[in-house]
Amino acid sequence: MLEIDELTGGYFAGNPVLHGIRLRGAPGQLVSVLGANGAGKSSLLGAVFGFLPQVSGSIRLDGKPLAGLGTHQVARAGVRMVPENRGTLPSLTVLENLQLGGMGLPPEEVATRVEAELARFPRLRERLRQRAGMLSGGEQQMLAIGRALMARPRLLLLDEPSQGLAPVIVEQIFELLGTLRGSDMTILLVEQDVGLSLEISDYAYVLEKGRVTREGGAAKLLGDPMVREAFLGVA
Ligand SMILES: Nc1ncnc2c1ncn2[C@@H]1O[C@H](COP(=O)(O)OP(=O)(O)O)[C@@H](O)[C@H]1O
Ligand SMILES: [Mg+2]
């Protein structure tokens, strides 16, 4: 269970970009944070993953406090992040990137999990010996997600997986993300693509200028006139 309370934070002391955020994510849930460019979505993920410099308030995962920990310790607590730039290592092969995601596990376990990710992303099996840098944008996104899942995280953070991808590829990625719901992992997805995100979310928060201005079940937000007008372009 992810519990964020009274989270305020930013890049410089006295200049917060996040203001008093409260957020919950239960195991099995896909929770979206929606908002325009500059709303503070990446900063929020940075606060959870331990690289936003100034953080106050409480961030807990399964009761364990994360606020103030470095990225390394947050990762050790069972958190993985797929950053906006995907973060795969371009000169390593697809297989090597996946194996890195299982670092620290016994080799047989790594092999088992690689097999599980290749079953999830058949495209990656076809590209197994190619360098990650040679993959298409969509394939790199699949690799980044697969690599994060190798660790079987308690909490998966995703920063705008739709970015820079063709609509048909985005739909494939989001469909896949939808299938990840219902396990004992919490997924926190931040996105500008509000319509697609709400389709696969259990619950969502709208972030504006670092503040949560709306929240609710995905169906409720899809029907919210403000959300429809501001983010979906329909009245
Ligand atoms: N590295 C940084 N240093 C200083 N300010 C930043 C940095 N990154 C983002 N910001 C500022 O923080 C605010 C929120 O940005 P960000 O979290 O990147 O928004 P989003 O991910 O929703 O587009 C913006 O005002 C942005 O200018
Ligand atoms: Mg961002």
Image: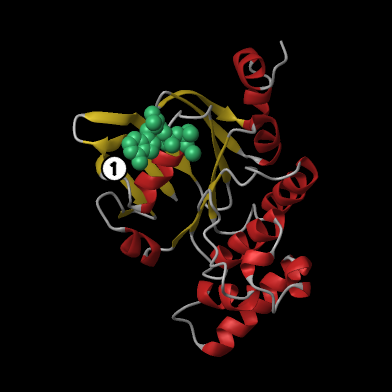
Residue 140, image x, y percentages: 65, 60
For label 1, the crowd category at 10 Å Cα-Cα, with few meaning under 14, some 14 to 19 and many 20 or more, is some
Residue 28, image x, y percentages: 58, 52
Is residue 5 at least partly visible in the picture? no
Q: Residue at x 45, y 51 (%)?
A: 1
Residue 123, image x, y percentages: 77, 66
Q: Residue at x 53, y 48 (%)?
A: 84
Q: Which image quadrant: the C terminus?
A: top right
Residue 32, image x, y percentages: 56, 38
Outermost residue toward the top?
235
Disc 1 is placed on an element classified as strand
55 left or right, relative to 195? left
Q: Nearer the viewer, residue 223 or 74?
A: 74
Q: Amino acid at mark 1?
A: Ser
Q: Is residue 115 above or below residue 161?
A: below
Q: Is residue 145 above or below residue 45?
A: below
Is residue 20 at least partly visible in the picture? yes
**Residue under circle 1?**
58
